[in-house]
Image (cartoon, rainbow, N blue to C red):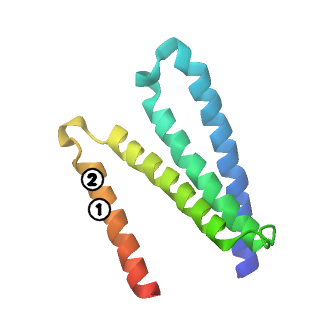
């Protein structure tokens, strides 16, 4: 089962890197003619997938043994940074795609639920 999950993670790494390149190219190409306002969604998705690609790349490299000599604190810091980038991108996606009439409520609810999920995880793991 573990080998299967590592293989899936390896495939996900490659897919997310491809998504990052596609959205980065799109943002660079469309920025000049239209400006940031017209491509906010693409920027939010790009930021989210940059974090996802980093997170899954770290996880995959750990599982296949590429980071055996790296200091654990550095690896944890990278996981936190990648998770933070992915979370910011996800919150921006929620903000952009939520109806204007709902205001800030959807992304604030998502942030609170994410924090609750983290706290519950800490409680059951510790």
Q: Image height check: is 96 above or below 80?
A: above
Q: Is residue 3 left or right of residue 117?
A: right
Under circle 2, the secondary element is helix
Residue with the most extreme top position? 33
Q: Image height check: is 52 above or below 9?
A: above
Q: Is residue 2 left or right of residue 35?
A: right
Distance from disc 1 to disc 2, alpha carbons, whole Å, reads: 6 Å
How many other residues sit within 10 Å of disc 1, few (<14), some (14-19) or many (≥20)?
few
Q: Is residue 7 visible?
A: no
Residue 28 appears at what percent x and percent y? 60, 24
Q: Is residue 105 left or right of residue 113?
A: left
Pick the residue in front: 14 or 32.
32
How many other residues sit within 10 Å of disc 2, few (<14), some (14-19) or many (≥20)?
some
The C terminus sits in image quarter: bottom left
Residue position for label 2: 108
Pick the residue in front: 25 or 58.
58
Q: Is residue 96 visible?
A: yes
In which quarter of the view is residue 113 placed? bottom left
Question: Tags 1 and 2 in contact by the CB under 8 Å rule?
Answer: yes
Residue 96 appears at what percent x and percent y? 36, 38
State the mark number for residue 112.
1
Residue 119 appears at what percent x and percent y? 36, 75
In which quarter of the view is residue 95 placed? top left
Under circle 1, the secondary element is helix
Q: Residue at x 30, y 50 (%)?
A: 107
């Amino acid at each position: 089962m573990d080998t299967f999950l590592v293989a899936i993670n390896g495939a996900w790494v490659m897919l997310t890197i491809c998504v990052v390149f596609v959205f980065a190219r799109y943002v660079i190409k469309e920025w000049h003619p239209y400006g940031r306002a017209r491509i906010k969604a693409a920027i939010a998705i790009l930021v989210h997938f940059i974090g996802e690609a980093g997170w899954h790349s770290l996880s995959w490299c750990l599982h296949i043994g590429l980071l055996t000599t790296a200091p654990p604190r550095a690896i944890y810091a990278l996981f936190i940074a990648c998770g933070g980038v992915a979370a910011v991108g996800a919150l921006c996606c929620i903000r952009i795609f939520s109806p204007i009439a709902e205001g800030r409520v959807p992304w604030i609810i998502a942030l609170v639920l994410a924090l609750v999920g983290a706290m519950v995880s800490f409680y059951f793991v510790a």
